Image (cartoon, grey):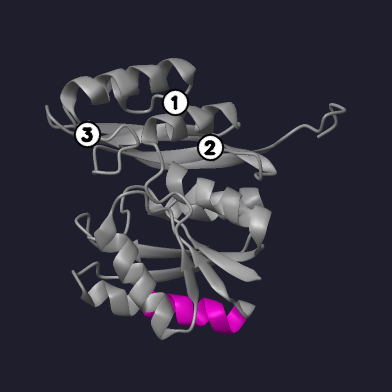
């Protein structure tokens, strides 16, 4: 079937796209760009850089701007999906929801109103195993925001790998937060994954830290073509 992925540029929506590709034809990525940081439904930090990830994957993107107002933003989601459905003859929509019932239910309601099937392949996944699988399956992502006890300024810009994931899991157990950041403890940005043809190289960014929470603001990023197995770009 023809499918799209609600795409934020983070690990969860990217992994959902990875799963979707194994089951359906992913025709496009759908990204809502909120005008405010406290959107209930959509990511805000560095959302504009999803366009470079779309190019890395070779998958078209439908961008739709929203004011990010609670509940009203669902109308914007509906319009974005309506455009995508008409443009790409879609049957299904994949989301990266893991534990957020608020996001999952509202996405399902919007999809249902358009005659689209909504699939959340990561729903209720074991978060510790999921984080470990991300690294093992070749996903490269950096942490772009933190807001949980134990995650200090040094974590901003740090890449997810075996060592860092192990530390996150240990801290999550100790401080009782979600190791996959599903409760808003952190955000990520994917640099590379198995279906990217090029990887994202961040050239310039700033860190913003207020003593308790922080984020990275990407100013410049470029695509670097991957080399084939034979060593030829």
Please say whether residue 114 is one of the residues in the magenta stretch. Answer: no
**Disc 2 versus disc 1: distance between alpha carbons?**
9 Å
Q: In this rendered view, identify the residue nearer to me: 22 or 218.
A: 22
Q: Is residue 10 shown to the viewer in this render?
A: no
CB atoms of marks 3 and 1 within 8 Å: no
In percent of width and height, residue 8 lies at 42, 54
- Residues in magenta, as a range: 77-87
Q: Residue at x 45, y 35 (%)?
A: 130
Question: Mark 3 highlights which residue?
Answer: 214
Q: Residue at x 41, y 71 (%)?
A: 64
Secondary structure type for disc 2: strand
Q: Residue at x 38, y 54 (%)?
A: 97
Q: In this rendered view, identify the residue nearer to me: 149 or 208.
A: 149
Question: Mark 2 highlights which residue?
Answer: 191
In percent of width and height, residue 217 lies at 33, 40
Where is 87 relative to 135, above or below? below
Question: How many marks do you count on the picture?
Answer: 3
**Disc 3 versus disc 2: distance between alpha carbons?**
20 Å
> Which quadrant would the N terminus be assigned to in this image?
bottom right
Question: Mark 1 highlights which residue?
Answer: 159
Secondary structure type for disc 1: loop
């Amino acid at each position: 079937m023809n499918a799209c992925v609600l795409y934020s540029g983070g690990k969860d929506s990217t992994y959902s796209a990875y799963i979707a590709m194994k089951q359906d034809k992913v025709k496009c990525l759908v990204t809502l760009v909120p005008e405010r940081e406290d959107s209930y439904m959509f990511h805000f930090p560095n959302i504009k850089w999803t366009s470079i990830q779309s190019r890395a994957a070779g998958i078209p993107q439908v961008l739709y701007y929203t004011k990010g107002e609670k509940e009203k933003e669902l109308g914007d989601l509906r319009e974005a999906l309506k455009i995508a459905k008409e443009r790409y003859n879609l049957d299904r929509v994949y989301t990266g929801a893991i534990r957020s019932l608020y996001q999952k239910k509202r996405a399902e309601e919007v999809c249902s109103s358009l005659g689209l099937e909504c699939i959340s392949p990561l729903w209720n996944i074991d978060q510790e195993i999921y984080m470990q699988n991300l690294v093992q399956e070749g996903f490269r992502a950096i942490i772009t925001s933190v807001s949980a006890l134990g995650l200090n300024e040094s974590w901003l810009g740090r890449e997810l790998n075996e060592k860092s994931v192990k530390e996150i899991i240990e801290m999550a157990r100790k401080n009782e937060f979600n190791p996959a950041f599903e409760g808003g403890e952190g955000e990520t940005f994917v640099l590379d994954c198995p279906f990217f043809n090029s990887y994202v190289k961040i050239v310039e960014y700033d860190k913003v830290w207020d003593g308790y929470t922080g984020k990275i603001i990407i100013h410049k990023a470029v695509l670097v073509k991957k080399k084939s197995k034979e060593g030829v770009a």
